[in-house]
Image (cartoon, rainbow, N blue to C red):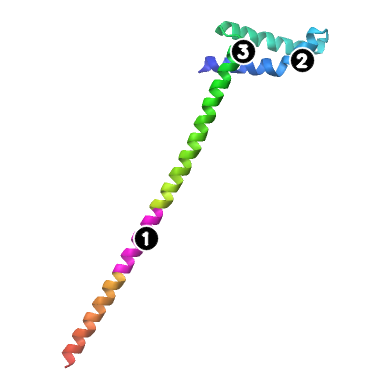
Amino acid sequence: MEKLLKVFQAVENIEQEKKATIFYKMGDDTFKESEQIVLEARATLKEEGLSFEEAKKLREYYKELLQANEKETKQLRKEISVGYKIIKEVKVRQENKEIEERAIKEEKNKQEEQEKKYVKRK
């Protein structure tokens, strides 16, 4: 991975300094540093056995992979969020049902107790 990062950085440097090196080649010495950066980047690419175009395509390929991964991750996060909301809603409904059942049971017990009291009085 470190090898690829060096290649991608070299491509980035070449793209950033490309215009400045044109001015240097035309005789403007103020862009000598830019020319040096481009030469070092090209040497890095040469060490790795890649041309600028190959390295650029490789960078685009990995960039697309990362974007696809980010898109899929975002979609999965949405789905997980929806899943948690559904689970929460189911739990709340279940708790409400249990509370309602307890309340009905308590009411039924109260009615039975009242009926027992009423029967005892007769």
User: Residues under labels 2 and 3: Cα distance?
Assistant: 19 Å
Rendering quarter of residue 38: top right
The residue mark sitting in front, 1 or 3, is: 3
Q: Give how far across and how far down residue 60 sits, in percent.
A: 58, 21
Assign a secondary structure to mark 2: helix
Q: Which residue is mark 1?
A: 93
Assign a secondary structure to mark 3: helix
**Magenta residue span:** 88-101
Q: Which mark is residue 53?
A: 3
Assign a secondary structure to mark 1: helix
User: Residues under labels 1 and 2: Cα distance?
Assistant: 67 Å
Q: Is residue 56 above or below residue 25?
A: below
Q: Is residue 36 above or below residue 94?
A: above
Q: Are marks 1 and 2 in contact (CB under 8 Å)?
A: no
Q: Is residue 14 above or below residue 103?
A: above
Q: Give how far across and how far down residue 82 sits, in percent.
A: 44, 48
Where, quadrant-wise, is the C terminus in this rendering?
bottom left
- Callout 2 amino acid: Ala
Residue under the image location 45 percent in, 43 percent down: 79
22 relative to 120 in the view: left or right:
right
Residue under the image location 83 percent in, 10 percent down: 28
Badge 2 crowding class, 10 Å Cα cut-off, few under 14, some 14 to 19, many 20 or more, is some
- Callout 1 amino acid: Arg
Q: Are marks 1 and 3 in contact (CB under 8 Å)?
A: no
Q: Give how far across and how far down residue 85 sits, in percent.
A: 43, 51
Among numbered discs 1 and 2, the one appearing first in the sequence: 2
14 relative to 23 in the view: left or right:
left
Rendering quarter of residue 91: bottom left
Q: Are marks 2 and 3 in contact (CB under 8 Å)?
A: no
